[in-house]
Image (cartoon, rainbow, N blue to C red):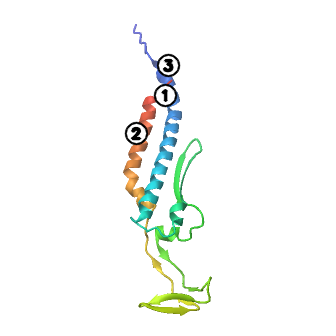
Amino acid sequence: MLTVQITGADALQNRLANAPAAIQSALRAKAADLAERLRKHVTDDKLSGQVLQTRSGALKASITAEVDDDGGQIVARLFSAGDIKYAAIQEYGGRTAAHDILPDKAKALAFLVHGAPVFAKVVHHPGSQIPARSYLRSALADMGDQIVAEFRDAALDALNGAAP
């Protein structure tokens, strides 16, 4: 008769039972870390001259990172929060409609044409074709390989360290 005894089976079973929670926790922490680093890449690089120059700082200040965890799925989002009307057209490009430009703080608009001052009560703008100037998608592309590698490493470290 053959007798087999497995040493450590209970410890292995406990370790595997704890692995999903350990992995979930590690991935949630890694997602928060990476989302913040991606947000900083957007604000400190992409919106500071790499893609767009800062004018008012409103777009840069609106960039927000969030991580949601419903227990089964971890979602990290990076987006422009608030009422920044030009955020999407800068990211994706597009066309603005023809519109009139009217003065709001004076009786006339003032601008230069070929170095000479011009005053007008209204300017009929024909609309503009705005090229895509991706600051979010390009930042994600910059960090994509790093993000995948760090998530993989975090999951493996959590699995290897899942204690009974």
How far is mark 2 from mark 3, CA to CA? 26 Å
Q: Quadrant of residue 50?
A: bottom left
Name the kind of residue labelled 2 in the image: Asp
Q: Earlier in the sequence, mark 2 or mark 1?
A: 1
Does dot 2 land on a helix, a strand or a loop? helix
- The disc at residue 153 is 2
Residue plotted at (43% across, 63% down) = 48
Q: Earlier in the sequence, mark 2 or mark 3?
A: 3
Decide if residue 20 is on the left or right side of residue 133.
right
* Res 17 seen here: yes
Estimate the x, y position of residue 64 in percent, counting from the top left: 54, 56
Query: Which three-letter amino acid code belongs to the residue tagged 3?
Result: Asp
Circle 3 is placed at which residue position? 10
At which x and y percent is residue 28?
52, 42
Residue visible at 54% across and 89% down?
124
User: Which of these two is toward me, 104 or 80?
Assistant: 104
Q: Residue at x 39, y 53 (%)?
A: 143
Residue of label 1: 16
Residue sitting nearer the eye, 34 or 112? 112
Q: Nearer the viewer, residue 149 or 37?
A: 37
At numbered mark 1, what does the secondary structure look like: helix, strand or loop?
helix
